[in-house]
Amino acid sequence: MNNKIVIGLLGVSFVVLKLTKVIDWSWWYVTMPFWLGYALIGLLLILALMADKKKPKTAHTVRKSKFQQRLEEMEQQRKSKLS
């Protein structure tokens, strides 16, 4: 059986048990199967973004704009003319 289906059925069963007063849990616990997956995805996204910021940028990974490339070419031409 698919994990999404199992988690969905678990969530629906918790809601039914809460509404029939079989369990006396907080609604946070009852609805946890519905929002827990989104919370985990959000946490992983935040961790991935933090890891990317810590990674040092090297010259070959930083993409230069065409304007910046043209300026560098002009600077190299100027230096070669002076030599």
Image (spheres, grey):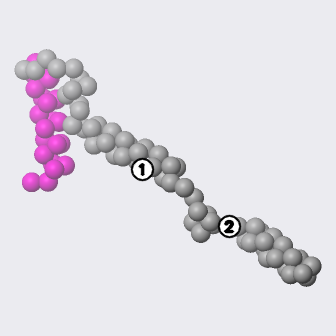
Left or right position of 20 against 82? left
Question: From mark 1 to mark 2, how far is it between C-alphas?
Answer: 24 Å
Under circle 1, the secondary element is: helix
**Residue at the extreme right of the image, as rendered:** 82
- Residue named by callout 2: 64
Q: Nearer the viewer, residue 33 or 57?
A: 57
Q: Is residue 2 above or below residue 80?
A: above
For the image, the number of numbered tags is: 2
Q: Name the residue at 25% across, 25% down.
A: 28
Q: Is residue 72 visible?
A: yes
Q: Is residue 26 magenta?
A: no
The residue under the point 45% across, 49% down is: 51
Query: Could you tell me residue 74's position as x and y percent?
Result: 84, 75
**Residue 32 occupies quadrant:** top left
What residue sits 37% from the left and 41% below the top?
Answer: 43
| Between 52 and 5, the one nearer to me in the picture | 52
Asked if 76 appears above or below 40 in the picture, the reply is below
Q: Residues within 10 Å of mark 1 (few under 14, many from 20)?
A: few
Residue 83, given in percent of the width and then of the height, sits at: 90, 81
The answer to which of marks 1 and 2 sits earlier in the sequence is: 1
Question: What is the three-letter code of the residue carrying label 1?
Answer: Ala
Report helix, strand or loop for mark 2. Answer: loop
Residue 37, horizontal then vertical, whole percent: 28, 43
Which residue is identified by label 1? Answer: 48
The amino acid marked with disc number 2 is: Lys
Main secondary structure along the magenta-highlighted residues: helix
Q: Is residue 16 magenta?
A: yes
Mark 2 neighbour class, 10 Å CA radius: few under 14, some 14 to 19, many 20 or more: few
Magenta-tinted stretch: 1-21
Where, by quadrant of the figure, is residue 62 drawn? bottom right
Q: Quadrant of the N terminus?
A: bottom left
**Quadrant hosting residue 11:** top left
